[in-house]
Amino acid sequence: MAWFWAVTSLVTVALILGLAYRPLGDYMAWVFTTESDWRAERWIYRLIGVDPRAGQSWKAYLRAVLAFSGAGLVLFYALERLQPYLPFSLGFPAMSPDLAFNTAASFVGNTNWQSYVPEHTVGYAVQMLGLTVQSFVSGAVGIAVAIALVRGIAYRNRGTLGNFWVDVVRASLRILGPLALIAAIVLLAGGVIQNLHGVTQITTVAGGTQTIPGGPVASQEAIKMLGTNGGGFFNANSAHPFENPTAWTNVVQVLLLLLIPFCLPRTFGTMIGDQRAGFIILATMAALFCVVFVSITAAELSGHGTAFQVAGAAMEGKEQRFGIIQSTLFATATTGTTGGAANSMHGSYTAIGGMVMILNMAMGEVSPGGVGTGLYTLLVLVVITVFLTGQLLGRAPVVFGKRIGVREVILSGVMILVLPVLALGGMAITMSLPSIRDQIVGQAMSEPGPHGVSELVYAFISAAINNGSAFAGFSANTPYLNTFLGIIILLGRFVPIALVLALAGSFAAQDRTTASAAELPVYRPQFVIWLIFLVVFISLPTFFPVLLCGPLAEGLA
Amino acid sequence: MSAVTAAAPTERTSRVQSRMRAMWGPLKSAFRKVDPRVQWHNPVLFLVWCGSVLTTIIGISEFWTGPADSGGLRLPAGFTWVIAVNLWLTVIAANLAEALAEDQGRFQAARLRSTREGSTAHRVGRYDPRADADASDAVTTDVSSIALRPGDIVVASAGDIIPADGEVIWGIASVDESAITGESAPVIREAGGDRSGVTGGTRVLSDRIVVRVTVPHGKTAVDKMIGLAEGAHRQKAPHELALTALLASFSVSFIVIALTVNAIVSPFALPVSVPVWAAVVVCLIPAEIAALLSVTGVASMSRLVQNNVLADSAHALETAGDITTVVLDKTGTITQGDRRATHAEPLHGVSRDELLRAAVASSLRDPTPEGVSAIALARESGIDIGALEERGRSGRTVLFSAQTRLSGIDLPNGSSARKGAESAILAWLKHVGTQPSRAVVDELKRATSTIARAGGTPIVVAAKLADEPGRILGVIHFKDVVKPAVVARISQLHALGVRTVMITGDNPLTAKSIAAEAGVDAFVGDATPEDKLALVKREQADGHFVAMTGDGTNDAPALAQADVGVAMNSATAAAKEAANMIVLDDDPTKLVEIVETGRRQRATRGALTTFNIANDIIRYFAIFPPLFVAQFPGLDKLNILRLHSPASAILSTVIYSVAVIFILIRLALAGVPYRLVDLGRALNLNLLYYGVGGVIFAAVWIKLIDLVVSLIPGY
């Protein structure tokens, strides 16, 4: 029966995404190729002083990304530190410097790691001016970078990749804005709250007092999911009944998470004028998503232990109103996109279920990945796969009309190292500092031992890949972890962006061949299987040894 | 009989001896290459080298400290030493592979080079090109060929070895180039035109030529290419570099593991020892591909040399595999270059015999292929050539020239015969005072244009008997004949997925019929030499990788523009310099072997890489769980091969990783078969063979090695 629900949920999600694929994908392609600006956009360009028609080289594009994100980081940090002086602060004090840095880095980096309890830390001003604004624009930056790479593939003999300012403004105003508005209304209809009431104290029937928080939740919730941000209004995130009241809103939230990442392949196909290219990306994303969903669900349905036998499934840490399937579906979506939202406590999943979530992130977030990041990461992996395919067939590695040379392979080769170096290196440095190590083992981990290793691994991979979800139980609000994870988040965000833009630049400078003679058999199922295999092969072995001491030690005991 | 039986054992011992010697040299140089300064150039192998040194040092230190535990696991005595020995074996095996390949290349290079050692040259003291073009009056001095400089003039007569690469500036000679090409048939080399290039080390068989040395000794394009074939100055080709970079990236991730995991799990798990990490890293990094990459390069280069093709860089060979379009010259490549008379078409009122007799008469002393072939046609038709020859002996021959465009004979009795281009014949008739009637001219025009439309060349025959007006007898149909082997070669190119484009100076009609006969995909007629460059550029703009052959100086720009430019050995120095490959035996269809070798080299690398990746899957499950299984016994469930013990699992994987290099050396040297099926199917098959096959191969062998290792006490 459970499997019946699993298949039904999956098919429902797939059907709705299938309906959106073409119109939304083509709409996004139009947004990034049209020459006409809206009046509001022209005002913005005049205000920041950019010529919307001027193309940028990949270096200029990268500088713009860094300048924009850097400015956002500083502004956000200032807001958090000046919280007491802002209206609607609900009387919360200024955030500590390290926590403010961590929060700013994680929202600017589209990670939305929250090492604080939002309803007890941030007022509505920071919530709306900082968190919500960054939720929009950090998602827009991801989309812009992906579009720059797509343009690099589509262009021939050009030194430019389009204009970052135009891309980020259009992604915010024409894509994320309208979609978030619709989503917010749908969520409101589903019972998500939206007010500025602050905290209400009520006396319950039994005579005790209860604190009922309020707030502009639906608006934040919409962009939290759409922009694959994941920064919840409440600490419990999408497990909180005000954020995600029913199984129905739960499906809506999953759909919102997956909507843009799954439609971007269509945008890609339309912009380079070959839908087959979009399809192989889509097929890879969808296949990986299904594999992960089935694995987590199987793990949760077949968990063992006393609690399991009483409840009939591994229900610990999951909301009764969602059940296993709605929880695993959400977990698959949130770890497969850089979502980081959660409707259940990931730390309470079975060891193997938890491990699959770690692996889903460790694959580099390509199932289907964050807004923009999923597409560009997968395209980098396509570069490596095509290079190896060319070798295997004795032919020149040519894909989407572009030749893959030394530079492209080196950039891709460095790209696949970013995650293991940041995650494993970060963990090793952290655990080599005796005082930090004692503090983490003694306080941060909910239980020392293999489960603690899982929490640690989850936290660092989540930061390095910009996911932002956590294995609940790991309390990371310490000056060291806040600062260190903040740095990892920024590196994990902007080093790949720099590499991807460099790749886009070298593609754009090339001519684009349309000769079928030079074409490798890329648009076929066996290529997709080969690509999936390499995605797994490249990413997972690196984490195999630490997983041995974490979830595998726990789960196979 | 007895002689044979007596000879056999000595022959066998000498073969064994020579094979021992053949192994001994590479083995020695393999040991020499263990020098870290050499290893440094290959980052992945340098890593293996570092691992070997590290384990050896730890092995030595264990004499005092005693063996250390790894991850709570008590390792058998001498474990570190066994690992160290295996790591050193990996280093040696990797270098042995390279040394073997280099040895193969050196052997072939020696054969080519032996022809280019010093010989005696007859250097002309002061050459006067106008007064004494054949240098018959000039003083010559005998010098060693090594002393020759570019610009020197030398004379070579029958029996002489041509001392250096150069250009014939006077004379014509037949030259035996078998020392370079292995082809026994002599070739003609003559001053002017596209057959003026001579190669040092070849022998003049007849006649005498004056040669201007163009390149100093040992510096010629061919010399450079021989050096490359030897593997002396091997640079890495772009895709080899890219693959090295990708392998380095894979390797770095395993080093990151080795450096970080102990620290990460330190609160809950005992550290894994350094020798074990060294073993893990060396097993998992793509050491065998790194070792064999250069082997595939050197082996492919010597395969090219076996086919009498020299390449100027590893890059050129690699690009050869990319080729999707081949530009072929019609003349010399597709056709023999000479037209053949296929049939005679007399005009109204003329007998066929009369036409043929006049054609023979006008061709009696015409050495051009047209003349020879016209006589052959007449002989086939039963004309008595002997009688005509007898009569013509006293006549005066008019030789063919590019200006007059006709040839013929004037007999003492006042009659004459001519054959030539239509306009030339009409002009001749006018010259002898005849104005053919309009009807005749119309009929002639019809006949010639019919032949031209069919792609042939019409040659008009006219005759004038003494005291009679001259008259047009008819037209001989000359046709380009496609070389018999060419059709098969072109279909081979098609099978490789290569498009063929023919380029020719002929009119489009001729070009079309030849193109159809030869089976090429496209053709360009009426082409000037400059059009070749334009054609190459156009094909490249369409996304094709273009190869072309050429031999003339005016081919040089196009040869340089093409992704792979292939010059014939007889080509002019300029063409050879512009090309990146030289075909020693002047066979332009060698393009088939060139493309195939390039494809095969890359396919071999792809196969090795895929095989290694597939192997790694098994190695992960063999070598990772033992690291921590002593502390978390549940991990034994991951021991899918049911290996005997953690120590045995680690050792078996290490031994397998060494052994597989030895097995793959053969594959790398021979190259994998290149599949000529549709690419999608080829991908399936290759993934099946090297991917799935690699998984099964590794699983079976690691299990088998484990069965043996488990017999050793302590494992």
Image (cartoon, helix red, strand yellow):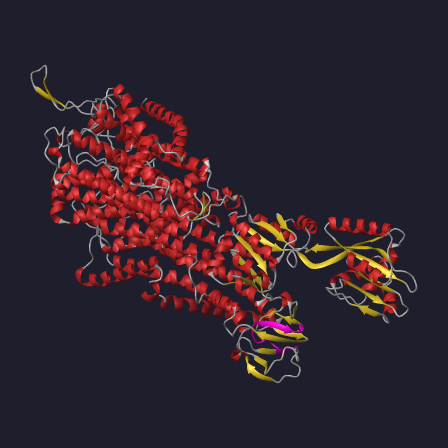
Q: Foreground residue, B241 or B32?
A: B241
Residue B2 lies left or right of residue B259; in this view the side is right
Q: Foreground residue, B27 or A482?
A: A482
- Rendered residue at 34%/38% (across/down): A167
Residue A215 lies left or right of residue A42; in this view the side is left
Against A78, is B211 above or below?
below
Residue B19 at x, y percent in the picture:
48, 67
Residue A2 shows up from this direction = yes
| Residue at the left extreme of this rendering | A207
Residue B546 at x, y percent in the picture:
54, 53
Q: Is residue B171 magenta?
A: yes
Residue A432 at x, y percent in the picture:
16, 50
Occupied quadrant, residue B549: bottom right
Q: Foreground residue, B6 or A530?
A: A530
Q: In which quadrant is the N terminus of chain B drawn?
A: bottom right
| Residue at the top extreme of this rendering | A205
Q: Which residues are magenta?
A: B155-172
